[in-house]
Amino acid sequence: MQSVLTASGRVSSLEVVIPNSGWIEAICGPMFSGKTEEMIRRLRRATIARKRVQVFKPSIDTRFSDQEIVSHGDRRMPSETVKSACEILPSTHWQTQVIGIDEANFFGPNLVSVATQLADAGKQVIVAGLDTDFLGRPFQPMPDLLALAESITKTLAICMCCGAPAKHTQRLTDSGDLIVIGAGEAYEARCRNCFRPDTPRQESLDFTVETASSPEGLET
Ligand code: ADP
Ligand code: MG
Ligand code: ZN
């Protein structure tokens, strides 16, 4: 039986509800909210439990490493890079029990059926990704994955304007493209009140880089 312990050490309801079965755990929230750190924490615990673990990330995400998932706080874990969601199934070893998929938002809608097939095949699938885009709109495939998942964790960051819990990803550059790869130089976390989807602060980018490059004291 695959057991899941919560942070408090209690066995979660997953163990009771679906013994000997696969499932989907979704971790969603804005950038900088700790999705990758939470995924690494869960995958490390699975490794300690001697489960066979595989981690996938999209090749489009070249920000920190192409062989590891890397958090903004520089926590790392080896991963396999795939070009699209379709490559995940053929890359999954039949003995793998736990599968981590980071940056779900870069994989597009095909990830939904891939995660479902893996869970149906008995795998524990942990998927992390943005649930809203730079305009604050639901960002596929995470909304569908949330609907299909057995477990949902929503992480919040710290608003870089006021310090409140932040659920939005504020784009700081002047682009209308849905996907623009970047980290602290291009995005920051904002709360509902401070989020300004229509006014990227292109003119104050230098100031923004200074602000976003020293986030370590803001750990939640
Ligand atoms: P995500 O995967 O959600 O983008 P990460 O797990 O990569 O988040 O990074 C979380 C880490 O980012 C935090 O532990 C903290 O060190 C750092 N960080 C930087 N900016 C912020 C912020 N505005 N709010 C919270 N944490 C932040
Ligand atoms: Mg991440
Ligand atoms: Zn705010």
Image (tube, grey):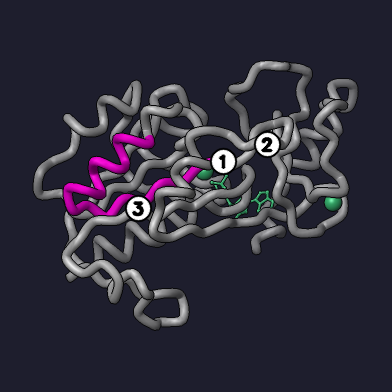
Residue drawn at the location 33% of the way across and 60% of the way down: 44
Q: Please tell me how crowded label 3 is: few (under 14), some (14-19), or many (20+) other residues with Cα within 10 Å.
A: many
Against 26, residue 168 (above or below) is above
Is residue 128 magenta-colored? yes
Range shown magenta: 112-130
Foreground residue among 134 and 209: 134
Distance from disc 3 to disc 2, alpha carbons, whole Å, reads 29 Å
Per the image, the residue denoted by label 2 is 184
Against 62, residue 160 (above or below) is below
Q: In which quarter of the image is the C terminus?
A: bottom right
Residue 11: x, y in percent?
35, 79
Q: Are marks 3 and 2 in contact (CB under 8 Å)?
A: no
What's under tag 3, amino acid-wise?
A: Ile
Where residue 164 sits, quadrant-wise, is bottom right
Residue 24: numbered disc: 3
Identify the element where label 3 is drawn: strand
Badge count = 3
Work out whether mark 3 precedes mark 2 in sequence or the reverse, and give the earlier one.
3
Is residue 214 magenta-colored? no
Identify the element where label 2 is drawn: loop
Where residue 195 sits, quadrant-wise, is top right
Residue drawn at the location 25% of the way across and 26% of the way down: 87
Residue drawn at the location 22% of the way across and 52% of the way down: 123
Residue 59: x, y in percent?
39, 24
Cβ of mark 2 under 8 A from ligand 1: yes
Per the image, the residue denoted by label 1 is 130
Against 135, residue 7 (above or below) is below
